[in-house]
Image (cartoon, helix red, strand yellow):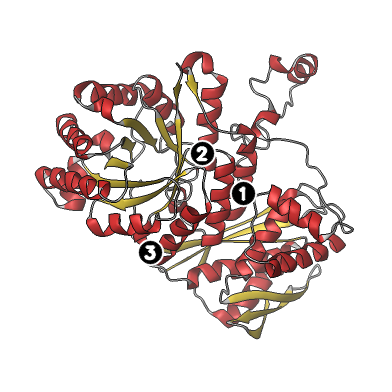
Amino acid sequence: MTDKLIIFDTTLRDGEQSPGASMTRDEKLRIARQLERLKVDVIEAGFAASSNGDFEAVQAIANAVKDSTICSLSRANDRDISRAAEALKGANSSRIHTFIATSPLHMEKKLRMTPEQVLEQAIQSVRFGRNLVSDIEFSPEDGYRSDMDFLCRVLEAVITAGATTINVPDTVGYAVPELYGNFIKTLRERIPNSDKAIWSVHCHNDLGMAVANSLAGVKIGGARQVECTINGLGERAGNCSLEEIVMAVKTRKDYFDLALGIDTKQIVAASRMVSQTTGFVVQPNKAVVGANAFAHASGIHQDGVLKARDTYEIMRAEDVGWSANKIVLGKLSGRNAFKQRLEELGVQMESESEINAAFAKFKELADRKSEIFDEDILALVSEESVLNDKEQFAFVSLAQHSETGERPHAKVVFTVSGHEVHGESDGNGPVDASLKAIESHVKSGAEMVLYSVNAISGSTESQGEVTVRLQNSGRVVNGVGSDPDIVVASAKAYLSALNKLQSKLDRVAAQG
């Protein structure tokens, strides 16, 4: 019988650790619902003990998602594990993922603990967790750089204590495929009770080999769970990419001989949702989900594809959810059609008044833009959800003047805690003037480290989607705004980023 490969998605936990990728509870919930439609086996919803915001997000996802196992990360201590268990109470299927570092470097420099102390804490944390939930995953942080003998002792002990999944992370992306695959194999061969747990791999992309390492861990090492993220999102160079793992295993079933539960037609929708929510644009040549993934420019290639698709295509675009942009709605569309389309896109509003507010925005957009695409609707709803969060800053209106030879000038009206304020400034361009106009009142002192514009649906009539990344006092946040007018979109994105800077949620750093 063919073994099943478990897909463990950590977009909402490890992916969110990418600087500027922090998400609101509603944004996380929307992505979690899409992951459920994708039929991801396990969703790591967050790190419940890291902040009240993360706790609420894990709790909301546990209550809403029914078909996937919901997991929360925790350090190897009773407080974290209890907090995770509490957040997961509403889940149909729950898992606690606890970790402690086992490499000599991390134990000495970071934990300042002896190996025996680490061993004891690992055992106690798994025992404690098993009293709260039946499904416990244990990770030796920086496992790949750990001493083999010590690592075997720890992993044997935690399996005896009740760990059901053993995850071996390449926390710093140091591994190469053959060595990492054999590392997992050696662990499984040397540990006498290794057959009592499912083995998992968690690889980072610092050397560009996260997917290759993960597949080697599966094929050579015998791992049956891969931890990954949508679009390979994650800190530093990112995590193992879910879409690449899934399509590699599916396309090369002849080699891997593994079954998958994933609905691959939902991959592109998940990719777009994560990209739009975080502001991390997918590079055009990204495998599977990049805009050029199924584009053929060479005349020879085009000729071959026209004659027989499999001459140059190893998978079908339709199988991962690519399709031509369809006009889904227009200015004459009614509220019910709009509501139905929201449901098809996996967007669930809390109340009818929220649907009405989003529909009013849709009608306003339809008057300005003749063709409304799925991406437009997602962008519109993302913006609406931000406004509904009662955040400190909200855009009202903008007026700007620019002409050749004259310095551009902008006036921006926005609200601060519900009170309308006006900002005015010159600038090097209309965008610069508009953002300086906002700053003239806010005086945040934040440094802009990224500004990017992306056309949502690819025409001059398209909505512009702007990402602004701000840094202040060591915090990095992304703000995303969309509007047919890119100057307005820029102002919205800047205010969105300021809102995130204002939400001073103290987070505890997690493992990689």
Instruction: Identify which amino acid the numbered label 3 is placed on.
Output: Ser
Looking at the picture, how far across and down is residue 465, in whole percent? 68, 56
**Relative side of 260 to 101, left or right:** right
Relative placement, left or right, of 496 versus 373 is left
Q: Residues within 10 Å of mark 1 (few under 14, many from 20)?
A: many
Q: Quadrant of residue 153?
A: top left
CA gap between label 2 and label 3 equals: 25 Å
Q: Earlier in the sequence, mark 2 or mark 3?
A: 2
Query: Looking at the image, which is closer to me, 24 or 475?
Result: 24
Q: Residue at x 42, y 48 (%)?
A: 14
The residue lying at 22 percent from left, 50 percent from top is 128
Relative to 272, say whether 169 is above or below: above
Q: Which mark is residue 40?
A: 2
Quadrant of the image occupied by residue 499: bottom right
Alpha-carbon distance for marks 1 and 2? 15 Å
Q: Which residue is mark 3?
A: 51
Report the disc number at residue 414.
none
Crowd around label 2: few <14 · some 14–19 · many ≥20 (10 Å): many
Q: Position of residue 11 (x, y in %)?
A: 48, 46
Numbered tag placed on residue 273 in the rendering: 1
